[in-house]
Amino acid sequence: MIDWLRRPPAELTVEVGGRTLPLAVRRHPRATRMILRLGATGREVCVTLPPWGRTLDALAFARSRSGWLEAQLERLPTPACPVAEGNLTYRGAVLSIQWSPGRARKPQICGPTLHVGGPQQSLRPRLQRWLEEEARRVMAADLAEYCSLAGVATPPFCLSRARRRWGSCSGKGTIRVNWRLIQAPDHVRRSVVAHEVAHLLHFNHSPAFHACLADLFDGDLAAADRWLKHEGRALYRHFG
């Protein structure tokens, strides 16, 4: 009986709003209870367990909260591929995409318009590459600024394509920031960069860390956190 309870079921899936979603079970060394969430793109259900947690319990927990998961699924923005006459969000501003085959392939901003040329069928990947290039440029500047304020050397920096985290700071000091934040308002993106720089001095979430972050960040942290909580999933709409 005990062996059967420990053995994971053959299929880890949850029915949500008429869709069958895979269940991802993760164990975290500091978790003390089960935490349920819907993946950022709505393509999976995730449960975080304490190290001793059982997969069968996670599955039962997720299935018992199918109504809550369905409500979360309904709140997700409808996926949309950026098209020639559509819109794209850049640093909190909505830009109108104006495509013409005779224009340069690299997007160029002119007021509220984003001009771009090249083959129309490759428009989406080129727009994503452009946003990633902008993210690398803008976030590197943010990082250098906050490191200077903190009095620390600028560490290695990478863009992240994570689906769950906006930023991270490794034990070796490498900082990663989700490239999709280039679509968010400036104060939101900068709050994430400042958060990770504060971790260079305090590798925890202690009162000293929060005091350091408050000293570094030149905006309203609570407002930035609220924006990410309520609007963050929309950053995956075009580039999930």
Image (cartoon, rainbow, N blue to C red):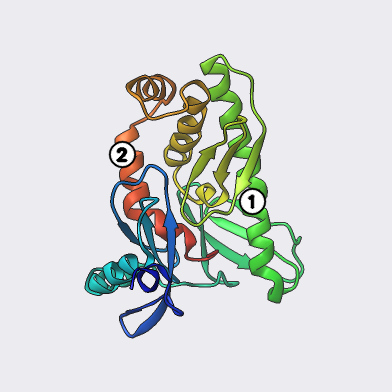
Looking at the picture, does residue 151 appear above or below residue 77?
Answer: above
Residue at the spot 62% in from the left edge and 45% down from the top edge:
159
Residue at the spot 28% in from the left edge and 71% down from the top edge:
60
Image position of 48 (left or right of 147)? left
Q: Which mark is residue 189?
A: none
Q: Residue furthest top?
A: 151
Alpha carbon distance from label 2 to label 1: 25 Å
The x and y percentages for residue 58 are 33, 65
**Front-lying residue, 22 or 123:** 22
Quadrant of the image occupied by residue 223: top left
**Front-lying residue, 78 or 206:** 206
Q: According to the image, label 1 marks what residue?
A: 132
Q: Residue furthest bottom?
A: 18
Quarter of the image where the N terminus is located: bottom left
Circle 2 sits in a helix, a strand or a loop, which is it?
helix
Residue at the spot 57% in from the left edge and 49% down from the top edge:
179
Which sits earlier in the primary sequence, circle 2 or circle 1? 1
Neighbour tally class for label 1: few under 14, some 14-19, many 20 plus, Cα within 10 Å: many
Q: According to the image, label 2 marks what residue?
A: 223
What amino acid does circle 1 point to?
Glu
The x and y percentages for residue 158 are 65, 41
**Front-lying residue, 8 or 186:** 8
